Amino acid sequence: MQNNKFAILAQKLFPQERKLSLRWLIAASSVPLFGVVAAFGIAPETETRHIPLHTVIENLQLPSVSPTAESNSSFWHEERIQRGDSISALLDRLDVNDENIAGFLQSAKGSKSLRQLIPGRIVRAQTDEDGNLLALQYISGSDSMLKVEKQDGKFNASDSAVPLESRVMMKSAQIRSSLFGATDAANIPDTVAMQLTDIFSSDIDFHRDLQKGDKFTVVYESFYNKGELIKTGRVLAAEFVNNGKSYRAVWFQDREGRGGYYTPEGKSLRKAFLRSPLEFSRITSGFTSARLHPVLKTWRAHKGVDYGAPIGTRVKAVADGTVAMIGRQNGYGNLLVIQHQGQYSTAYGHLSAFAKGLRRGSKVSQGDVVAYVGMTGMATGPHLHYEFRVAGIQRNPLNIAMPTAFPIAVQYKADFSRMAENLSMRLNLLKSTNLASLE
């Protein structure tokens, strides 16, 4: 009966009034969808075409503002450091007119970092209306901020910790000429590229195996302060497709603080020995039983691998071990020998220098910088002579089978599975899109 009354009532309304009635019904029915909706009803037979309008004007009382005897206005300016910038040029762009500050920044011990301007970083300055400096801020390192403040007419410089915001970055790239060329094109930091070579160094020889068309996807940490990138953190997950074969790695740290890279299935990617003691180089002479010696001009065996690299290039320990010999030895020049577990040892020759503090008996860990490339001894140019020895006998490090490290401990498998699933989803997300990066 009630429905019939509503139907009859609707038939009596004029077309315009029926539209208004329907709008009221739609508004009322939309309340559950939008939460709070203001609904207005119009009674039947109400005239809506000629509604009188009335203008109402009211005088509002504004609160009185008493002028201050002295203005305390200050302004913040910020400028990005450009290549070739000097402190004076930077202060000019920051509208700092204080003649004393330039001299202070040039001489004060606490402001040493500001004399080492890093292009791309931001400097912030607070000045008064006349351009006199009140404060200056510059993030000089990865975790410290230089603050210069004016107190009692004098400038003081101090360092303080930088509050950082962590973000997870996801990017992908394709090899066209080199790894660094690909990372530069995708705006991936060099530190991330270096981590990629370390992570996959046991499966991919980055000196010989890279091919045009190889692809990689990487998930890594970045740390920001007020929108400015301060530093790049650890690679959390990565996939590298080399010659059509896919390699994946995820970072996992257990509750005891021990961390490492593993396959998504929990197999450790860390080998007992790295394939190469140099991050990037070229092989100038391989392991062979007969080679014309470049200095002696006689045919003799070459029981190692030579890596051509500039003098001063960092040499890394390929495995954990103890320094067995450090010093000068005949044609090797400056020679370092590291004894590893069991019958394994490695030798590094023609070095320009050893790592500071390194001596016989020193403990080293895999990846530690232990020396620097040189051309001491019988060498015609800067390079590293590297030997891999088993029971004192040189073996070819490029084709010998390397032992692997232990997999995930049983008690941490559940934690690892949750972490690996999350990171693998991130890799899959970027891999399935046409984007080169996600944040």
Image (cartoon, rainbow, N blue to C red):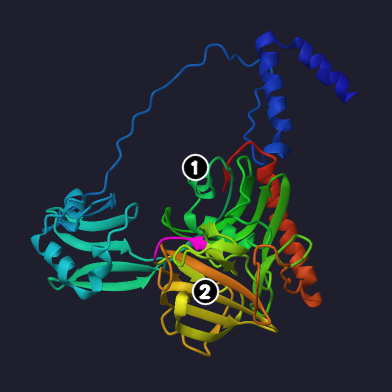
Q: Nearer the viewer, residue 397 or 426?
A: 397
Task: Please report the residue visible at 18 percent of the width from the left and 73 percent of the height from the top.
Answer: 108
Magenta-colored span: 307-311
> In this figure, which residue is indicated by the disc labeled 1?
185
Relative to 174, is 407 on the left or the right? right
> In this figure, which residue is indicated by the disc labeled 2?
348
For disc 1, the neighbor class at 10 Å (few under 14, some 14 to 19, many from 20) is few
Residue 286 lies in the magenta-colored region: no
Q: Quadrant of residue 91?
A: bottom left
Indicate the secondary structure of the residue bearing disc 1: helix
The answer to whether residue 287 is seen in the rendering is: no
Measured from the top left, where is residue 439 in percent x and y?
57, 48
Measured from the top left, where is residue 58 in percent x and y?
33, 34
Task: Please report the residue visible at 64 percent of the width from the left and 77 percent of the height from the top.
Answer: 389
C-alpha separation, residue under disc 2 versus residue under disc 1: 35 Å
Q: Amino acid at mark 2?
A: Tyr
Above or below — where is 345 with respect to 379?
below
Dot 2 or dot 1, earlier in sequence: 1
For disc 2, the neighbor class at 10 Å (few under 14, some 14 to 19, many from 20) is many
Q: Amino acid at mark 1?
A: Ala
Q: Quadrant of residue 121?
A: bottom left
Extreme residue in the bottom direction: 361
Measured from the top left, where is residue 305 in percent x and y?
57, 65
Indicate the secondary structure of the residue bearing disc 2: strand
Task: Please report the residue visible at 58 percent of the width from the left and 41 percent of the height from the top.
Answer: 436
Relative to 23, is 8 on the left or the right? right
The image quadrant where one finds the N terminus is top right
Q: Nearer the viewer, residue 60 or 333?
A: 333
Q: Nearer the viewer, residue 50 or 21?
A: 21
Circle 2 or circle 1, nearest the eye: 2
